[in-house]
Image: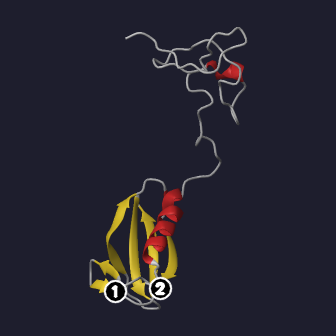
Amino acid sequence: MGEQAVTGPETSAGEPGTAGMNADGGAPAATPGAGMNADGPSGAAAAVPGAGMQADAGSGAAPAAGPQSRTADVVPGPGGVMTDEVGVVTGELTLRAEWADGRVTLRVQYKDADEWYTVTGGSAALADPAGLDAVHGIAVGLLHRPEG
């Protein structure tokens, strides 16, 4: 299979530019600004395959080492929240999203109670704990229905 260039805007000579990409991974002719190096090296240093494509590398933030959790008080709508341990729970509840060992799990408890119950279907793989806030926000948005 031959090379197929992914072309961009025309150059000043009226020929199509390649914007630094092609379908087979070869290095096409240079086009100004093609390296997309917002925080990376200059275009000349970007000749190394993959250069400038380090969105997550070197951010300085170390990954979280242990379990994490987020909590919020919710009032579910009619039908309550189904749990694995006791079935449906209703009324004023506290929702907790927990991340540990690459998984997120949703649990609820009656507000100010001691026992926590696992939300049925509320567990999934989540490799990066940075996603915990998003998962918790979505769960609160889905479960908190104080007006029904």
Would you name the residue on which mark 2 appears? Answer: 147
Residue 33 position in % (x across, y down): 70, 24
Give 79 or 88, whichever is nearer the viewer. Answer: 79
Residue 107 position in % (x across, y down): 39, 76
Residue contact at pointers 1 and 2, CB within 8 angstroms = no
Give 78 or 116, whichever is nearer the viewer. Answer: 78
Q: Amino acid at mark 2?
A: Glu
Residue 25 position in % (x across, y down): 49, 19
Task: State the SS at label 1.
Answer: strand
The residue depicted at 48 percent of the width and 73 percent of the height is 140
Looking at the picture, the colour scheme in use is secondary structure
The residue depicted at 42 percent of the width and 63 percent of the height is 100
Give the label on residue 89, or none: 1
Q: Amino acid at mark 1?
A: Val
The C terminus lies in quadrant = bottom left
Task: State the SS at label 2.
Answer: loop
The residue depicted at 50 percent of the width and 58 percent of the height is 131
Give 77 or 128, whichever is nearer the viewer. Answer: 77
Residue 62 position in % (x across, y down): 59, 52
In front: label 1 or label 2: 2
* Mark 1 or mark 2, earlier in chain: 1
Establish if 3 lies above or below 50.
above
Relative placement, left or right, of 39 versus 8 is right
Quarter where residue 44 is shown: top right
Distance from Cα at disc 1 to Cα at disc 2: 17 Å
Give the label on residue 115, or none: none
Quarter where residue 87 is shown: bottom left
